[in-house]
Image (cartoon, grey):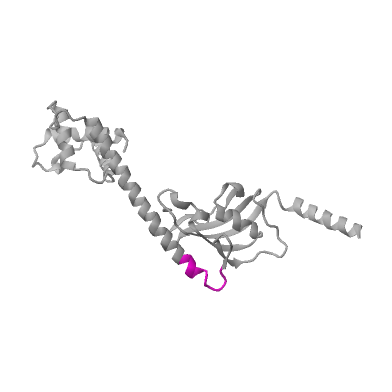
């Protein structure tokens, strides 16, 4: 955690620590003035941040705040306080990294088992890369397909294997437009196989999604992702593309 969070926590706890005896109920503290309300708000938010700091001893921290506020000598003597804080933060980082490593390992195994079973279902196709898909709806015969250089417009909904939806243009009621060159590998492989009007369900192994790093708080490391994708349009294709195709066919007829 950044030092700012610790400073804020100390600032807002000083008033409570300095004004109360150890046994006084914190509920009796007055929160009436604007300064008191702001102090409470800062304390509340800081405590929320600190709740993620595994190993933090609240009573010891309050004792340190009280001693520092009153000018009492540190109970730790000559020990470097800043170094102690840095060491504590480093231990937190190491614990979180170990937790992520374990989560990545668990998700990888879970994903492999899911894809192995899912690939046996009727209608599910598995490509050489490990991408799995099933066709939910087909567009018109002869409709265009995009290339990886194209920009497409789609409706989609993404979820985990547990059914947790993490993103949905359908819920937003707003189709998404983006270049295929700038999206995850699984989409780069699947979209060029689709034609406008198609709706597919995609099952992406972790390496075709966000990999070991995951994405934000919703997509964990090595998670298999499930997308329902409907290809609505291709930017740059349409009338011009149809005219070009017609011209090519006409030229071929003339050559014959």
- The answer to whether 239 is drawn above or below residue 76 in the figure is below
Which residue extends farthest bottom? 122
The x and y percentages for residue 155 are: 57, 56
Asked whether 204 or 240 is in front, the reply is 204
Give residue 18's quadrant in the image.
top left
Is 122 part of what is drawn in magenta?
A: yes
The x and y percentages for residue 158 are: 49, 57
Is 102 part of what is drawn in magenta?
A: no
Please report the residue visible at 59 percent of the width from the left and 59 percent of the height from the top.
Answer: 230
- The answer to whether 249 is drawn above or below residue 66 in the figure is below
The x and y percentages for residue 203 are: 52, 62
- The answer to whether 27 is drawn above or below residue 248 in the figure is above
Asked whether 6 or 138 is in front, the reply is 6
Magenta span covers which residues? Answer: 114-124
Please report the residue visible at 50 percent of the width from the left and 69 percent of the height from the top.
Answer: 118
Please report the residue visible at 16 percent of the width from the left and 29 percent of the height from the top.
Answer: 68
Asked whether 168 or 180 is in front, the reply is 180
The quadrant the C terminus occupies is: bottom right
Give residue 105's quadrant in the image.
bottom left
Residue 34 in sight here:
no
């Amino acid at each position: 955690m950044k030092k700012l969070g610790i400073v804020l926590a100390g600032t807002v706890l000083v008033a409570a620590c300095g004004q109360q005896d150890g046994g006084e109920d914190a509920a009796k503290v007055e929160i009436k003035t604007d300064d008191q309300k702001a102090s409470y708000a800062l304390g509340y938010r800081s405590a929320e941040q600190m709740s993620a700091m595994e190993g933090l001893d609240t009573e010891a921290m309050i004792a340190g705040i009280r001693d520092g506020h009153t000018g009492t000598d540190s109970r730790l003597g000559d020990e470097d306080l800043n170094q102690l804080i840095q060491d504590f933060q480093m231990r937190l980082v190491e614990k979180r990294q170990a937790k992520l490593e374990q989560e990545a390992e668990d998700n990888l195994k879970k994903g492999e088992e899911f894809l192995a079973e899912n690939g046996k279902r009727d209608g599910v196709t598995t490509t050489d890369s490990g991408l799995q898909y099933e066709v939910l709806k087909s567009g018109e015969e002869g409709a265009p397909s995009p290339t990886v250089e194209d920009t497409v417009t789609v409706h989609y909904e993404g979820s985990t294997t547990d059914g947790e939806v993490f993103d949905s243009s359908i819920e937003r009621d707003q189709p998404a437009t983006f270049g295929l060159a700038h999206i995850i590998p699984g989409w780069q492989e699947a979209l060029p196989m689709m034609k406008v009007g198609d709706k597919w369900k995609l099952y992406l192994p972790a390496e075709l999604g966000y990999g070991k790093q995951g994405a934000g708080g919703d997509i964990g490391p090595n998670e298999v992702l499930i997308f329902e994708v409907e290809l609505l349009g291709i930017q740059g294709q349409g009338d011009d593309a149809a005219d070009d195709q017609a011209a090519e066919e006409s030229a071929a007829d003339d050559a014959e």
